[in-house]
Amino acid sequence: MRLTRRLGSIAAATALVAGAGIAAAPAASASGLGENSLAAVLTSDGNRFDKNWYDFDIVTEAVLTVLAAKPSSPVGVLADGSVPLTAFVPTDKAFAKLVTDLTGSTPATEYKTFTAVTGLGVDTVEAVLLYHVVPGATIDSSAALASDGAKLTTALGSTFTVDVLDKPGKVAIRFIDNDPDDANAHVLVGKLDINKGNKQIAHGIGQVLRPINL
């Protein structure tokens, strides 16, 4: 279908990082922080598909799939805790929403969701993962809340924008990606500051960020 074909064109964007490694972004100071990697955190639960749609099994398996096919992929930076970065990590439910949007059918299990995502091709999966990584900066939730309007440059080379919603009794962070028609990803309460105290930090989000207009 049209969306699937268009999503396949994301793979072409991978050329932005091929042979270039990880480019540094304007960074919060990482001095004095630990070097536990996000890969270690994401795999610490055994990285098995389960019935909890609000953890990160699919993104973990997607990273491992890319690295198995392309050991020198820039995605490997997630396993190097000495490199400061911030990852905005979609939950399993976020990937299920993406598959529903692309196919019109909602997968019944995490495994079926993962199969649909990887069916788009390893280059496409790699590009999508890199669009969720901001290299060179350890951005905790406090820094994110103070960054309304900031454009964050990702490991893919393209950007998305921080939008802090400050309403009475509610403060939320969302990200404006390169698809103006999809729902914007919000940082999830309870999924903030994963691996805090280390150079690599992550925040869970409820939608998959899209690096192109689908």
Image (cartoon, rainbow, N blue to C red):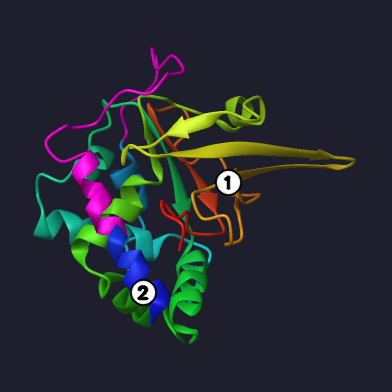
Please identify the dominant SS of the magenta region. loop
> For the residue marked with disc 1, what is the amino acid?
Ile
Picture residue at 16% right of the left edge, 54% below the top = 67
Query: Do the residues under discs 1 and 2 have CB atoms within 8 angstroms?
Result: no
Kind of element beneath mark 2: helix
Q: Amino acid at mark 2?
A: Thr
* Whether residue 76 is visible: no
Q: Is residue 113 above or below residue 80?
A: below
Compared across the picture, whether 125 is left or right of 27 comes to left
Residue at 29%, 66% (x, y): give it.
8
The answer to whether residue 190 shows anywhere in this view is: yes
Magenta residues, start to end: 10-36
Query: Is residue 101 inside the magenta stretch?
Result: no
Residue 88, given in percent of the width and then of the height, sits at 47, 45
- Among numbered discs 1 and 2, the one appearing first in the sequence: 2
Q: Position of residue 90 (x, y in %)?
A: 47, 57
Residue located 30% across and 37% down the image: 37
Secondary structure at badge 1 equals: strand
Q: Quadrant of the C terminus?
A: bottom left
Towards the viewer: 3 or 81: 3
Q: CA distance from mark 1 to mark 2?
A: 21 Å
Residue at image x 43%, y 14%? 29
Work out whether residue 9 or residue 118 is closer to the camera in this orientation and state it.
9
- Quadrant where the N terminus is found in the figure: bottom left
Q: Which percent across, then down, holds residue 178? A: 49, 49
User: Is 153 situated above or below 26?
Assistant: below
Place of residue 59 in the rendered image (x, y in percent of width and height, measured from the top left): 36, 59
Reading the image, the residue beneath label 1 is 176
Q: Which residue is mark 2?
A: 4
- Mark 2 nearby-residue class (10 Å; few <14, some 14–19, many ≥20): some
